[in-house]
Each structure stands twice: as C-alpha cells, then as structure tokens.
Image (cartoon, coloured by chain):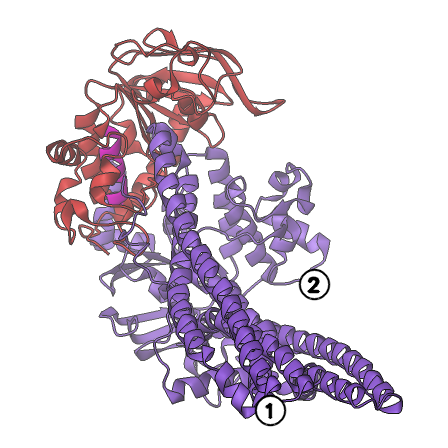
Amino acid sequence: MRVHQVNSIISRRTAAEVEDWSWNTTRRRLGVLWRLTKPYRFRTFLSVFSLLAATATALAPPLLAKYALDDAINNETGLNLTVVVVLFVLLALANWGMTYVETYMTGWVGERILADLRKQLFGHLQDLSLGFYERNRAGVLISRMTNDVEAIDQLVTDGVTTLAQSTLLLSGTAFLLIVLDPRLALVTLIVIPFMVIASALFRSRSARAYSSVRERLGLVTATLAEDIAGMRMVQAFVREQRATENFRTVALDYRESNMTTVRLNAYYFPFVSLLATLALAIVLGYGGHLYLNDAIALTTLFAFMLYVNNFFDPIQQLSQLYNTFLSAAAALDKIIGVLDEEPDVVDHPGAEPLAHIEGQVRFEDVHFAYGRGSEVLHGIDLDVPTGTTVALVGHTGAGKSTIAKLLARFYEPTSGRITIDGVDLNDVTQDSLRHQLGIVPQEGFLFAGTVAENIAFAKPDARPEDIVRAAQTVGAHEFILRLEDGYETQLGERGSRLSLGQRVAFARALLADPRILILDEATSSVDIGTERTIEEALRTLLSDRTSFVIAHRLSTIRDADLIVVLEHGQVIEQGSHEDLLARQGLYTSLYGDWAAA
Amino acid sequence: MADRPEPIELPDGDGAIYFEDVSFSYLPDRPVLEHLDLALDAGTTVALIGHTGSGKTTLSSLVPRFYDVDSGRVLVDGVDVRDVKLASLRRAIGVIAQDPFLFSTTVRDNIAFGLPDLTDAGIERVARLAQAHEFVERLPQGYDTDIGERGITLSGGQRQRIAIARALAVDPRILILDDATASVDATTEARIRAGLRQVMSGRTTLIIAHRLSTIALADEIVVLDGGRIACRGPHEELIKTSAVYREIYEHGLLERQFADAVEARADVEEVA
C-alpha cells in the first residue's frame, strides 16, 4: 500500500513556509501584534523597561569586579571595596527583581494578547458567512485557533524576550570589550567569522530539519487517524500486518527527521563551546603577552575573560530562536489570512431590524450563483401566503437547499428579491431575521450538553416544563425518558445518539416557535415506530406557521399546501397535490412511478 | 478477538452459513440477539430487514467475527468460526459497509486493498463487475487517481461502487452488504444493483436491506424483530402471510421508494 508515503498527496503538503519578506507584509505583521498590545501598553512598557534594566544589571558585575580588584591591588582596602561589594550584591538583587518583573510582565501581556487573538479569531469566524465554511475544512480552521496561535505564543512569551535580551547582551558585551581594550578585543573577535559561518549553516539546516519533522509528524498523525477510522475495513480485509508495516515506515521516517535535528545540535552547540574556549585561549595568550609587556592591567584582563564567557551564550540562543521566529511568522501570516476574509453577507448600510413578522414570503425573479460559479437558480417566482407549508421537491442539485439558504439569508440573490411581509431581506439586519426563523437540518446537530440544554438551544431561558412540553409535542418525551438520565443525559458524542438528532431538532424548533420554519427532512427509515411519531411530530411542527420543507417523504409532500417541483434551478410546476396530479406533468409521472411500485 | 490455540484454516466450501442458537449482547441485560437459529444455503442471497436496533448489523458482524457470540455457534461451511484462523476466515468474506470507507491513496490501491498482488487486469475486471470502471476511466489519472483528502472527491455512489470492487477483489465466498447509503440517487442505484446481481452469483450474500430495490435482489427475506426472527420467506409469500412484513413494506419501503423516485432524475453523477 502506498498510503501516506513520501510524495503521496498528504506528504506533498509543505509545512510552515514564509514566502513574503517585503516591508509591507512585515509591517502588516508587526501592526497586528502592536494593535494586540494596545490595551496593555503600560505593562508592555514595564516589561520592556525591566528587560533593559535586567540586561544592564547582568552586564555590570565583571566591570565592578575589576574596580574592586583595582582597589585591592592598589592597597586601597576599606571603604571603596565595601562600596563595590555592596553594589555588587545590590545589582544581583536588582537583576533578580528585574528579571522577575520582566518574566512576569511578558507572560502577563503575552497570555492576554494570545487570549485576545483567539477571541478575535473566533468572533471573526462567527461573522463569516456559511459559504466560507463550505470552502474550508473544520480541521484547518481549528489548527488556526490552536497550533498557529501556539506558535505565536512561543514567540511572544519567550522569543521576543530572548531576542531583545540576547541582542542587548551581545552588543553590550562587544562594546565593553572594545572599551576595556580595543587591541585585545579585535584579536579575540577573530573567532567571530567562524561563529557566523557555523551559525548560518546550522540555522538553514535546522530550519529544513524542523520543517521535515513537522511534515513527517503530520504523516504519522494522518496515517494513524485514517487507520483508526478505517479499522473495520483493515480487519475485514486482513490488512493488519501491512498497516503495521506502513505505520512503521512512517514512524521510522519521523524518527530519522528527529535524528537529523539531534545530529545538528550535537555538531553545533559543542562547536560554539569550542569557539568560546578558543576565544578564551586567545585572551589568555595575547592578553598575557600584553600584561608581561605592561601593556594591560591584570584586572582588565580578568574582566575581559569574564566578558568573553558572556559573549557566546547569546549567539547560541539567537540561533535557536531562528526556528521559533520562522514558524511564528508563518503562523501569523495564516491567521492574518483568516482575519482578512470578508463575510459574503453583511448587513447593508441602514439595515433596519425586521419587525415581528406574520410569515408571508415572496420570491421575485430570484437568480443566484455561488461565488463566480455558474448560475444555479434562474428566476424563481414564489408567492407563499402566511401559514403555508411549502414542499420543495426535485433531484439533487435542482436548487432546493439553495432556496432555503437564500431565505435564511446565508447568501444573497444575484438579482431579484426575496421579501417577508413585503420587506426586502436585503434591507434588514441578519440577526433580527434569523431570530424569527427556525432551521431544522437533516441531521439534527447535537451539541455537547444535556438533552434539555440541546432542546433549549435557541431559547436558553426556557422553563423545564416548556422543554418537556416541546418534547412531548414532537413525540420525543417517552424516548428521552428511556435514556439513562432522561433530560439530563449528556449528549454530543457521535454515534449512539443518532436517532435522537432530528427529534431534538424538532423540539428545539418548536420551543423557539418561529413564524417561518425551514426544514430539511431526513429520508425515511424502515423503522415503523419511529416513522409514525416523526410524521405526527412534523404535522404539529408545521402547523400554524409558514414552512419550507426540503421534502423526502411522500406523506409530507402529499400533505403540503404548496408543492414546488424544481428542476435545474427552475420551478417546473407548483400547486397542491391534487392540482399537480390533475395537470398530468412531471409530478404526475413521479407519482405514477411510485404508485406502480 | 484472537485466534484460539491451534486454529485451523477455513476448509474449502461454497459459503454455507449457519447461526445455531445464537445469543449476543453488547451490554449485560440488554440482549440484542436471543437464541436465534438461521441457516443460509450456499450461494443464496438473503435480505435482513427490521427496525433500527433489531439486530441486523449485529447478526452480520458475527460472521467475520467482529464480535463473538455469547452462546451458541456461528458455522461457515460446517466449521465454528472461532476454530478458524481469523485471517483465513476473513479472507473468505467480502464486506461492503454502510459507509464505504476509502483510504487516501489511489483508486487502484483501494480496490486491491485486500489483495495487494492483484494484477491490473484483475483490478479492471472487478471494477467492471462493480460498475465502477466507466467512471474511474474518466478520472484525471484513471486508476492512479488519488482519492480522499485533497484529492478527488467522489460521490456516494462512486465510493459505494469502489467498495464493491474492493470486496470482489478478494473473490470471497460470502458477501456482506449494507445498502443504507442515503446519498445514492436512483439512476446510480440501478447501476449498482445491476453490478450486484452479477457479483452475487455463486456467493452466499447477506444483505442488510433498507431499500425495496435491494430486497428485490434477494432469494429470501428474513425479518428480524427484537433479536429474533419474526418471519422468513420470499417476498410473494411474506406479503401474504406476514403482517409485520406488510407494514414495513407498504409503509417504510414504499415511502422511501418514492423519495428515491423524486431524486431519480439526477443526471449521471460526475466527478465533483
């Protein structure tokens, strides 16, 4: 089996890549982050300040030690030495305090920024129209909310601090080295080119290695997910051994990628230490030579050696930071991509809330196309008086669900208009419209929560007795009582509760008591008991309101006040069951097919 | 589920199945099947019908040993399935599940899932039998087209036909078929049915039936009710003698048939 091997569709998907480093994009990224810090400017400032202070206090000790030793050598014991030692201790305390403030404040601001970012993303997702969700898979969006935000988390809470601190330490140390003794500094810095070359090599190799690690981890997850989902087939076709072999291959690849990073780290980090020691040897050799020639003070040499030790840590840390930085930038780009999505349907300027409606619906020459696709509705005209049950009939793709979606204003007609009680849907706010609509999907979606909470979904303040009455009316009460905990039974897990979905959806819609109901009827099952109760429940649900039913049951179609037969986005016939039979058209032939069966 | 000590290979045979006094439950005190006896002659096609929860799927799952009976025995060609090597048993059974799960690899590898050494000619042969060859040929890379994530999206009917081809590829003596694919329109269903009629010949077929049209394929119908057999026999007989069958037939199945007829005008489905 070739499932998930290299070059299969899944593995070709490349991991985090940052393509655009132009100034505009960079400014956009920084802008997004900067706006996020807005509510926390004071604390952001505080963390920057404490960062600077902590770095300064970390740079000072070697210099102080030098002064203390200078005094000692000049036999100026006493006050000066005490002052220096006290200062030394104070600086250490200050460093401790400042580092605490810096760590705490950065974390405080960072976590809030990230929480805000998640909130902003989620809010934005809710604003986006359904069309967006038909184009994007849930998994990808969830990854934006979790993995990508997590990647930024690493940068914001840890990366930024390390970046600033290491850079400051590095330049501060270099500056002090030059001030202390320019000759010695220049000679010592001979190792820098080697350092730069090694770091550059490490950086590019490890960026590649880590991207391969992420990619192959993705393969491990995908393989696992698929084999678990398809376990019944794997067992039925006796594929266990091959599945194991295949998984072993994937797992080995993953291990290899990880080993590459291990090898790189094993090369690079000891090499940096080696360079550090070499630099120290140079200081010792050349510095000693200078001292013997009375060209440098012993104390300066001492301070110099302390600083050289300080010099290489930041370089190491900056090299490691590079990967964090790259993946954070890539993640930020993806998040910005989602934030840049505009909703397909927005409230028009001056949109008014829809007043309490009666439920008279008109479609006037409605045309519609999804995005830039070809037209799927070609001039639909419908006049639906208040309280009518409309059965939309036609084959898959005829336009039944499109009509329902337009009525709920999940999309807007490309031309023509839809009115409720004479008001154009384009002139009202989406919220006020949907508050007065009930929508029952084919597979009643159950949220994690109790049965009662699921029924009261659209009306969270409903009283328990109302919930029970709604369930009774749609014939779900007995059924619910037979569950382990009755109305308090927890739902939301897939599978075992399938039969409950549409009943709960019925009760949910009934409780909300909308003036207009849109219902996508589930196809009937062979289960007689269920069938009967569902038919009765439907009858109750549809009475006393305007209903649009994407109909799949004969009984629903026959009972409807208005049957609309659709084909290829056009209304072929409309009328009651008797009207249509009398007309001897498409409906009659469909009905005849059935009657003859 | 593991092999017993010293399991045997499934002996040659034509696929006779015998459920002998079988009882089964998933949870204690909630029996799904109770002392059920059912003999299926080799080469016959039997449709299982009954309400949700009547035990149809469970009964068919006992044959490839997805579960083991609590008491009683399931015999295939005279041998208790628990005495047979799992691999040897399952190689003799082709399963076409309710949700035709396909793996994200090529059409070819999906069809050859149970028999990776199958030749191209063999793959094409079973695809033709399953009425899949025609649409597979029209896919961008034919049998080498990747399906699944990021690949080509197939319609429910197309997936179903590949699943049928996959089951046929192992040339099983027993076929287990769940026909509850709601997303297949009648045109496609007619094609699938034509394919099935061919592939069922010479095999013992157990159909978990949800459609009138599939029931028409069966030599015999078994109506399950509450974990027992309510009645069995050919359609003509049951429609006269069994009230339960009549009710299911007239109410549920015809109802469904009409919905299918309404949808039947769908154009021949194409690659999405």
Query: Could you say which disc has been placed on residue A461 in the image?
Result: 2
Question: What colour do you see for chain B?
Answer: red
SS at mark 2 in the image: loop
Q: Quadrant of residue B14?
A: top left
Magenta span has B160? yes
Name the chain letter of the residue that bears numbered label 1: A
Cα–Cα span, label 2 and label 1? 86 Å
Query: Could you say which disc has been placed on residue A295 in the image?
Result: 1
Residue at the spot 27% in from the left edge and 43% down from the top edge: A2
Around disc 1, counting alpha carbons within 10 Å, would you say few (fewer than 14), some (14 to 19), or many (20 or more)? few
Furthest residue to the right?
A78
Main secondary structure along the magenta-highlighted residues: helix
* Above or below B245: residue A561: below
Q: Report the span colored magenta.
A: B157-168
Residue B267 position, x and y percent, is: 18, 52
Residue placed most toward the observer, A7 or B135: A7
Mark 2 and mark 1 in contact? Answer it, CB < 8 Å. no
Discs 2 and 1 share one subunit: yes
Residue placed most toward the observer, A514 or B195: B195
The chain coloured purple in the image: A
Q: Is residue A389 visible?
A: no
SS at mark 1 in the image: loop
